[in-house]
Image (cartoon, rainbow, N blue to C red):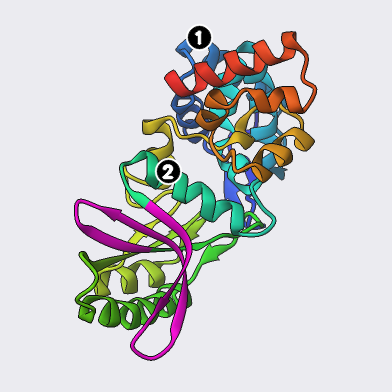
Amino acid sequence: MPSTLDVIKSSGESAKFSLSKLHRSLKKSGASDIIVQHIIDTVRDELYQGISTKEIHNRAFALLKKKKSYLASKYKLKKAIYELGPTGFPFEHFIASVLKYSGYDIEINKVLQGKCVTHEIDVLAIKNNETIIVECKYHSEQGLKCNVKIPLYIQSRYLDVQFNWNANKNNSTKINKAWVVTNTKFTKDALDYGNCVGLYLLSWDYPPKNSLKDRIDRLGLYPITVSTLLTNYEKKFLLSKNMMLCRDLIANVFYLDHLGVSDIRKEKIVNEINQLCTN
């Protein structure tokens, strides 16, 4: 490996390769120090100038999968969320499922009357007599960011809905928070504006230590698309049945019978998902 190595990021930008970042991402999968070091040593010997970060992660994923498939599933989490697409509809259902497992009562695509106009809200979530509206911004292409136009737009919708909801005496709760959730990252302007007006911003890497990735790892709420053993067809079938989370499949294993999965494969799939959700 050259002393300084340029890699191409998903955005198309060039950056210096960081061995420590690769090390951290592998460790976050739960891999042991021995496995991590083996993968780093192997990948380091195969690097070349101008290699894409996608190639590096694909190679690391393949090596990790040979060791333990459920660790590879955790490692490919970001890619798995992109695989929920190409539309934003499955991502909205996925976020709703994450909130549900966090103790919220949820409604999806709820139409609410604002002071001025009606609005279709991606997710309406209620917990402890508090109601929040959750708007999801899904990007199907890696490298795209959520810019300031998104929180600007959502803040105006939130204020319109909040005014009408809170003025209605028939509502037993108050709307006092709006979330903006994205599978990518926020630009600096988006973060500055969102935090200034009091929006709750949730992205792949934000807030620090409580980001979307952190929440998924901490609660074991992995999308079904992380599985390394299910085919793309099988994943699409399960998503069509609203099986967004691996945990959902554990409780509805009969769907694998509908897909004609053999008993041997079924046992491997269930074992992988059980390990993923309990580690």
- Ranked by sequence position, the earlier of labels 2 and 1 is 1
Query: Looking at the image, which is closer to me, 190 or 95?
Result: 95
Determine crowd level at label 2: few under 14, some 14-19, many 20+ residues with C-alpha closer than 10 A.
Answer: many
Q: CA distance from mark 2 to mark 1?
A: 32 Å
* Bounds of the magenta segment: 106-133
User: Which corner quadrant of the image does residue 129 belong to?
Assistant: bottom left
Is 274 contained in the magenta span? no
* Residue at x 44% of width, y 75% of height: 148
* Residue at x 34% of width, y 83% of height: 160
**Coordinates of residue 137 in the picture (x, y in percent):** 52, 63
Left or right position of 42 against 244: right
Q: Is residue 11 above or below residue 153?
A: above
SS at badge 1: helix
Q: Quadrant of the N terminus?
A: top right
Left or right position of 174 against 209: left
Location of mark 1 (residue):
34
**Coordinates of residue 196 in the picture (x, y in percent):** 25, 73
User: Which corner quadrant of the image does residue 87 belong to?
Assistant: bottom right
Location of mark 2 (residue):
98
Q: Are marks 2 and 1 in contact (CB under 8 Å)?
A: no
Type of amino acid at the residue the image marks with label 1: Ile
Q: Is residue 46 above or below residue 181?
A: above
Is 111 contained in the magenta span? yes
Left or right position of 267 against 248: right
Asked whether the viewer can see residue 279, the reply is: no
